Amino acid sequence: MQEQITKIKQQAKEEIEKAESLKSLNDMRVKYLGKKGELTLILKGMGALTPEERPKIGSLINSAKDEVEQLIQEKEQKFKEEEINKKLKEETIDITLPSTKIKRGSKHPINRVIEEIEDLFVSMGYDVEVGPELETDEFCFERLNLPKGHPARDMQDSFYITNEYLLRTQTSAVQARTMLANEEKTPIRMICAGKTYRREDDATHSHQFGQVEGLVIDKKENNVSLADLKGTLEVFVKRLIGDNLSLRFRPSYFPFTEPSYEVDVSCFKCGGKGCSLCKQTGWIEILGAGIVHPNVLKMNGYDPEKFGGFAFGTGLDRLAMFKYGITDMRYLYTNDVRFLNQFDRKD
Ligand code: PHE
């Protein structure tokens, strides 16, 4: 019987060694240690033994069972480790692969236009200035030759915080600020873009809109003239909207420029023939401009005998609409992602 046990043990050892899966190990557990397993069956045959032999053989069988169980467990452990290693290998992350794309916001069309205008004017030697949106009556009007009670203020009613503070109605306020802040009274070439406000609200006007202001002041002997203003605006409009456009200067009135002009651009939709966009005139008004009024120079510390220059102002919203073919101004302010996504291009 002893021999038989050793033989079974040996055989079990060999089979376990050869086992190739967890399943076959399990089969072996049944085969040797299960209820009808080979070692169990020997236990059952112990009735034929003498009382002296029984405990000896009993403990031999038990230790054989323990040994076999031990071997099976070791092998099981090995299989499990192999499986984990295999999984780890399969699931390793390749950190050299490109990452998933993160969706970023896009530049608003108005900001695109501002950046383009700033780039253009900086390339022509202008500085970029900023001014407050909550402005004083002094800078928004008085220092621009619009004293209190001036009739031209009627066109620019605004949101007054107090009698002296209002939301600025025009970026022209920055003209006065730039001139006054320049203590050395040296020549100025500046551009300023920003938000402006007026008390109006209809299909083609919003209570908040954007403007760009330009101001050039130079020594009288340098003769900054209307020709320079025209040339500058032509470069500006053609570069921003399209090369095949023409400009038209119409006499107009602004208290801070003299002479003053309203500048029209030929309709880019119909090419000047007349359509609904240009109200059948072939022209679209886009700018106010003129030669800086001597009073404005004087009030902001420049001697009109020694200095002169030009100024211009334009609405940003309309420029953005023309540039990108946007048909309704409200798209610019309603934050519809379907609209904004269209500007999500690399450039
Ligand atoms: N500020 C004027 C407006 O808002 C435009 C303008 C600017 C006109 C500069 C002349 C010179 O209507």
Image (cartoon, rainbow, N blue to C red):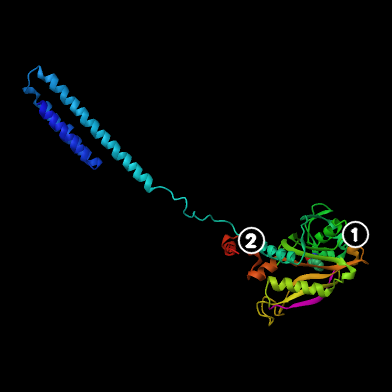
Q: Is residue 211 above or below residue 99?
A: below
Q: Amino acid at mark 1?
A: Gly
Which quadrant would residue 40 be assigned to in this image? top left
> In percent of the image, x 24 and y 42: which residue is there?
21
Which label lies toward us, 1 or 2? Answer: 1
Q: Residue furthest top?
A: 52
Which class describes the residues within 10 Å of circle 2: few (<14), some (14-19), or many (20+)? some
Quarter for ligand 1?
bottom right
Q: Amino acid at mark 2?
A: His
Which quadrant would residue 132 be assigned to in this image? bottom right
Q: Quadrant of the N terminus?
A: top left
Q: Residue furthest right?
A: 305
Q: What residue sits right under mark 1 in the picture?
A: 301
Mark 1 vs mark 2, CA separation in Å: 38 Å
Tag shown at residue 108: 2
> In percent of the image, x 69 and y 68: which residue is there?
319
Query: In screen coordinates, is 150 left or right of 320?
Result: right
In magenta, the rendered stretch is 244-254
Query: In screen coordinates, is 302 left or right of 196?
Result: right
